[in-house]
Every structure is written in structure tokens, then in C-alpha cells.
Amino acid sequence: MTCSEVQRILPEFLGSAPDGALQTDFQTHLKSCPDCSDLLSDLTFIASEARQLTASEEPPARVWVRIAAELRAEGLIREPESVPVRPILVPTSPRRRWSALWLAPVAAAVLAAGAYVINHQPASPVAKQQVASTAVPAPAATQTAVANPTPVTPAPVSTPAPQQLAQKSTPPSLNAVRPAVEPEPSAEDRQFLSVVSTRAPSMRATYENQLQAVNADIRETQAYVNRYPGDADARQHLMDAYQQKALLYQIALDRIQ
Amino acid sequence: MTDQKDRITEAEAIEQAKQGHEAAFEVLYHLHKRRVYSLCLRMVSNPAQAEDLAQEAFLQLFRKIGTFRGESAFSTWLHRMTVNVVLMQLRKKGLPVVSLEETLEADDEAPRKEFGTRDVKLTGSIDRLQLQRAIDRLPPGYRTVFVLHDVEGFEHNEIAQIVGCSIGNSKSQLHKARLKLRDYLKFMRAEKAKTG
């Protein structure tokens, strides 16, 4: 059997073993031809490695937020009958009214803060010190940040390859800079959690999970941007994460009002 | 995840989702999100598009969940639905679902074996990220068949049915995709060695 013949039957051989005589000729050729042997080895290796890619990527938290919003809009989500339904159109107390109205400006503030943080990152490959809190900054905190910019500390880091950020959900390098400890929720987050705590348990759990996920996304991406401030993809991803959080607040607001 | 979500099984979640329970929808989403999103991402090589496609796949699933009778595995049903959503998108964009290169390529474009210098085998020298990048570089048609067969585990007869080609064509596309990946991976390894 020649190399050309081996290459011709290789697709079949990789799928299932050829018949006896062909199999013998094939194996004999492989023993005497390192090129064909390497080719078979490489193709088998690629096929086996590819299986490791199944379910290897985590979608961003916003995907579920969008799905849930669409399901609600289409009326596919129905509250369980056993859950008492509150008259949510009219706030039952000044406290609740304030809590709901609070969400709109905070959602806007989230976006503004996100835009500020991202646009004020240096474009040079000089790492900035990590922003104090990666949870959503409050408007007041943002103003403070404007007045007192965080000091810059150079760090000998190189810009990652563009492809490194192609997988926006969980770039491998993000894992390396992931904070080990969950920070305390910000005042806005505590207020948000307080507002959604009036919802049905399943709904409340959804909001809590989404908030946790989007905060984690912001923290990870912020840490990455601090490390690679010149990376436009990372900055865009950070802005997306802030928008995601604003969207979460907005959905909560829509549901409560 | 909450304790409630941890306790519920997939079958229970399906039944509750048919009743419109949000928590059940979320359980199903979390059970399958990684595989669905990964499949979309591999096939389109664009995270933003993959998000949209994963969202559309789950929405289609939840809209039709009332018709699920359990004749096939739920995951099989969902993954088939996801593949259809992605292929529909590729067709809308005018991208070939199955590569046209087989008919367009001249014989001299076919994979060749180089003699003279032996290269080192790939085994052990590539990682997941490199393979992922190499897959992203495949032409869409090759990528579709490779992802469906080698990543997702579909059989050639299933791929032929899904994408509308012959079984032989599916096998041929897969083989050429693997050969291209091998070239890409060796090139990437050489580039990496050059840059140190």
C-alpha cells in the first residue's frame, strides 16, 4: 500500500476499521512510514481533543436575563398559584414607592459609572491599580473618583493576543486575576436585594443569582482591564457588563411598578 | 443556585416549565447553557452572535416545551434545535453550511503529504485554546461538520440529515477539516516557537 492509498482510505479508517485485508496492509504501511503514522496520530489526537470542547464555555449572565425578560413579555412565565399575589401596581407604602423609584436613577448611574470607569482607563499598556470596589459604584462614589483619580502604578505586563478576549464569557486569563473573596454588596445592591425580597421566592432567587453573576462578571472584567488597560475588547466587555446590570435593575423596576 | 433548584430534577423542571414556572425555566437553562452556548460559539466563532443564538435556541425550546413528550432525550431535542437555529442563521447570512470547496478545489489543492523533513507530532503540544483558535479559522462549512461530529458527537448520518448533504460528503468534509486543523496547529506551534 502506498502513501496516497493510505490517505485515500484514511477518512474511512478514522470512522471505522476497514476490512481484514485492508487493515493488514494499512497497519503494515504505518509501521514502515513515519509520515503516515504521524498523520494518523495527529488526526486521532485532534478528534479526541475536540471532545474536550463540549460545554467548555459559560455564557454571560445577560443571556438568561434577556431570555427571562422575553419569556415574561410573551407571557410564558406564570407565577405559581400558591404564591400570594401582591397588588403591585399601586405601592402599598411610601417606603416601597421610594424603593421602586430608586431603581431608575441607579440604573442610569450604573451605566454612567461604567462608562466613566472604562473611558478613564489609560490606553497605554500600563496597568492601573485595581479599582477599590468592583461592585457597582454609586453616583456619589463616581463623583469622588472624578475628584480623586486612583494613583497609577506601572506594571510589567504585556498586552494579550486579540484572540485571548475572543471568548468573552470566561477568558482563561480572567481566571488568573479573579478575586478570591466575594466582596460585600454595595449599598445599591443591598437596596436592590431589599426591593426584590418582596417578590415570590423563585423570582427573588432569580434576581439574586443574576445580580451575583453580573457582579462577578464586572469584577473579573474590571480586574482584567486593570491589568491590560489597552485592550479595547475587554473595555467593551466591561461596558456590556455594566449595561447588563442596568438592564437587571430596569427589569426589576418594570416588574415592581 | 438555590437549594430549591438543586433539588429539582430535569424531568420535574420540564413539567413545571410546561406550567410556566420561572424557576423551572431557569433550572433547565442552567443545566444546558454551557453546552448550548459552546455549540453556538464553536459554529459561528463570534461571542456576540453566539449569545444571540443561544438565547434564540432557549426561547424556541421554552415556547415548544409543551409539545415535548419525552420520546427522545431532552438534551438531544434541545441540541438538535440549537443546531437548526445556528444553521438557519448561517443560511440567512449566505454562508455555506457544507463547504463548497470540495467541488471548487482543484486536485492540487487537496491535502498533500510532504516528504523530506519530518515534523514533530501534535500530541501533547497543543492546548484547548490553540485548538479553539484553529477551529475558528476553519471555513464555515468545514467548521460545521467538524463541530457537529468531533465536538458534539453527532454521527455522519445525522449530520447529513441536519445539514442536507450526503453521508460521504459529511465524511469528506470532516477529514478535510481535520487536515486543515493539523496544518493550522502546526503553523501556530511554529509561530509560537519563533516568538519564544
Image (cartoon, rainbow, N blue to C red):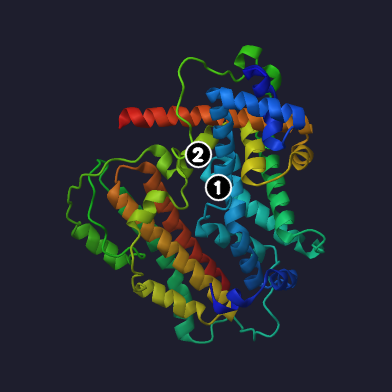
**Left or right: B153 in relation to A257:** right
Q: Quadrant of the C terminus of chain B?
A: top left
Q: Quadrant of residue A191?
A: bottom left
Q: Is residue B95 visible?
A: no
**Left or right: A4 in relation to A243:** right
**Left or right: B127 in relation to B145:** left
Which residue is label 2 attached to? B131
Up the image or down, A95 lies above or below B159; here it is below
Q: Alpha carbon of mark 1 to alpha carbon of mark 2: how far? A: 9 Å
In the rendered structure, the residue with mark 1 lies on which chain? Answer: A
In the rendered structure, the residue with mark 2 lies on which chain? Answer: B
Q: Are marks 1 and 2 on the same chain?
A: no
Residue shown at 35% from the left, 72% from the top: A186
Q: Which amino acid type corresponds to the residue marked 2 in the rendered image?
A: Leu
Residue A48 placed where, x, y %?
A: 58, 43
Up the image or down, B90 lies above or below A108; here it is above
Q: Are the residues tagged 1 and 2 within 8 Å (C-beta)?
A: yes
Residue B143 placed where, x, y %?
A: 61, 35
Up the image or down, B65 lies above or below A92; here it is above
Which residue is label 1 attached to? A53
Residue shown at 41% from the left, 66% from the top: A105
Classify mark 2: residues with Cα within 10 Å, few (<14), some (14-19) or many (20+).
many
Q: Which amino acid type corresponds to the residue marked 1 in the rendered image?
A: Leu
Residue in the foreground of this view, choosing between A76 and A17: A17
